[in-house]
């Protein structure tokens, strides 16, 4: 029985979901159980089982790998759904098809089904609402599964939100699980060691299902090997099963060759591959995606893989939003991802550019500041939007401190207002001819993208 006003569009559904306890906004406690999600899914008729799935976890690159898998499957003719987070410009980026959004009717009808289900459960529980029982992430995950079922998709590529073992998406029984590079992240929830975090990510490994694993530290690798053995899950460790060669990076993207050495994935060489995102890491992400797809569908054609990767796009992954001045945004938010982003940026645009930086609270600010300051002539510290808690004063102090260690110090500016910071960066770039990099958070990238007159939208 639907007592709320029925949603008239997808935005109404998202607004309703956003009224629930939202972990991403720092409200409520981390739910140490999948019971709520399992109950919701069962009440909805288990829509997560409506199509074969690929399930991704990791600290770095999981969004790119998820999108690339969806793009390859979509190019093969399979109607493929894509679930990722956070969104950059439009909330529908979280709940979409591989090549664009679902039609509005799908969002609306799936949303009405979701709202009616939650209200029915709340009524049966004799509570005024279910806000103490359900989380934002559980509900948006279920909305995705309901959209997939309603749209009669033939496959889905699903990215975890945080961790893995207790993530709402972990009700899936995927064809293949993929775990990307592990770093220290969300330590207040996942543990403060690589082994502890790897243990949480390893929770997505399913009995008997193959695991495609990116290169890891010895500490993390030991955890994954043990869990894969325990669950009798075939382990495809990327350094043993594949090799990326002949990487060529320019401002338009990345070309590379992939050598597959896994019998599960039909070993062979795929040459002349191209991803329209610059960066050696994107070649490795594409390699993981290809290995995963070919493990599930060994006879998928090389031409299909090539076409899927060539048409792949994902906001805020080394995305150029302007040519005059050159303005790149990237959602890098860990020390390792910042290091890789800087490597690509400086190789293509040189040193001495302008940096717009903002990150969320709890990040390794000192490490990121130490990596950034040697490569820029001007650094503008700002607030990375308001969706999650941040401490720009602390970030500014860290950058000033790191800059003080250099003989040639960059100018460090503090403009907490995000719009003012972006305008200042563009003004300086137009005066000096210098390129701009905006990074530190997907939320900052989203704010920059939103305010840019030359922003690009997903199809």
Image (cartoon, rainbow, N blue to C red):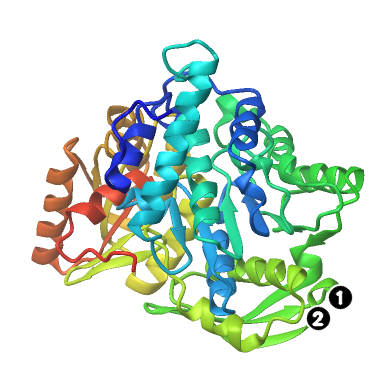
> Left or right: 279 with respect to 189?
left
What percent of the width, then of the height, locates residue 83? 51, 53
Distance between the alpha carbons at the discs numbered 1 and 2: 6 Å
The residue that disc 1 covers is: 263
Q: Is residue 35 above or below residue 419?
A: above
> Left or right: 330 with respect to 117?
left
Nearer the observer, 69 or 431 = 69
Q: Which mark is residue 267?
A: 2
Name the secondary structure under disc 1.
helix
Report crowding for label 1: few under 14, some 14 to 19, many 20 or more residues within 10 A (C-alpha): few
What percent of the width, then of the height, locates residue 112? 40, 40
Q: Which mark is residue 195?
A: none
Nearer the observer, 245 or 30 = 30
What percent of the width, then of the height, locates residue 304? 59, 84
Report crowding for label 2: few under 14, some 14 to 19, many 20 or more residues within 10 A (C-alpha): some
Q: Are marks 1 and 2 in contact (CB under 8 Å)?
A: yes
Q: Is residue 121 above or below residue 136?
A: above
Q: Is residue 367 above or below residue 425?
A: above
Task: Evaluate whether residue 148 shows in this view.
Answer: yes
């Amino acid at each position: 029985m639907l007592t709320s006003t029925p949603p008239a569009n997808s935005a109404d559904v998202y607004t309703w979901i956003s009224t629930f306890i939202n972990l991403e906004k720092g409200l409520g406690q981390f739910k140490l159980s999948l019971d709520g999600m399992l109950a919701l899914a069962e009440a909805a008729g288990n829509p997560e089982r409506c199509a074969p799935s690929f399930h991704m976890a990791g600290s770095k690159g999981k969004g790119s790998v998820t999108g690339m898998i969806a793009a390859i499957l979509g190019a093969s003719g399979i109607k493929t759904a894509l679930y990722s987070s956070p969104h950059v410009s439009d909330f529908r980026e979280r709940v979409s098809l591989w090549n664009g959004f679902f039609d509005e009717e799908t969002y609306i009808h799936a949303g009405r089904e979701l709202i009616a289900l939650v209200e029915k459960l709340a009524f049966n529980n004799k509570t005024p609402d279910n806000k103490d029982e359900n989380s934002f992430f559980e509900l948006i995950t279920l909305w995705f599964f309901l959209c997939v079922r309603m749209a009669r998709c033939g496959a889905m590529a699903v990215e975890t939100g945080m961790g893995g073992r207790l993530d709402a998406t972990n009700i899936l029984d995927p064809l293949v699980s993929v775990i990307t590079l592990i770093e220290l992240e969300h330590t207040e929830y996942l543990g403060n060691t690589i082994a502890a975090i790897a243990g949480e990510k390893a929770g997505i490994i399913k009995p008997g299902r193959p695991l495609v694993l990116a290169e890891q530290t010895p500490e993390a690798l030991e955890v994954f090997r043990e869990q894969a053995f325990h669950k009798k899950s075939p382990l495809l460790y990327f350094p043993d099963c594949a090799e990326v060669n002949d990487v060529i990076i320019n401002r338009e993207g990345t070309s590379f060759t992939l050598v597959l050495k896994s019998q599960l994935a039909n070993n062979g060489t795929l040459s002349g591959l191209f991803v329209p995102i610059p960066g050696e890491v994107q070649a490795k992400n594409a390699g993981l995606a290809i290995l995963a797809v070919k493990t599930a569908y060994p006879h998928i054609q090389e031409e299909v893989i090539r076409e899927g990767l060539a048409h792949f796009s994902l906001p805020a992954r080394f995305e150029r939003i302007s040519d005059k001045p050159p303005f790149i945004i990237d959602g890098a938010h860990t020390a390792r991802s910042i290091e890789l982003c800087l490597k690509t940026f400086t190789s293509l645009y040189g040193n001495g550019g302008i940096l717009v930086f903002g990150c969320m609270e709890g990040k390794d600010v000192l490490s990121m500041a130490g990596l950034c300051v040697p490569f820029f002539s001007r650094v503008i510290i700002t607030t990375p939007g308001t969706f999650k808690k941040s401490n720009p004063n602390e970030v500014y102090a860290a950058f000033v401190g790191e800059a003080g260690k250099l003989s040639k110090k960059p100018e460090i500016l503090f403009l907490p207002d995000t719009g003012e910071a972006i305008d200042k960066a563009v003004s300086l770039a137009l005066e000096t001819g210098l390129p701009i990099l905006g990074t530190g958070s997907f939320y900052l990238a989203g704010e920059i993208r939103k305010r840019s007159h030359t922003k690009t939208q997903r199809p």
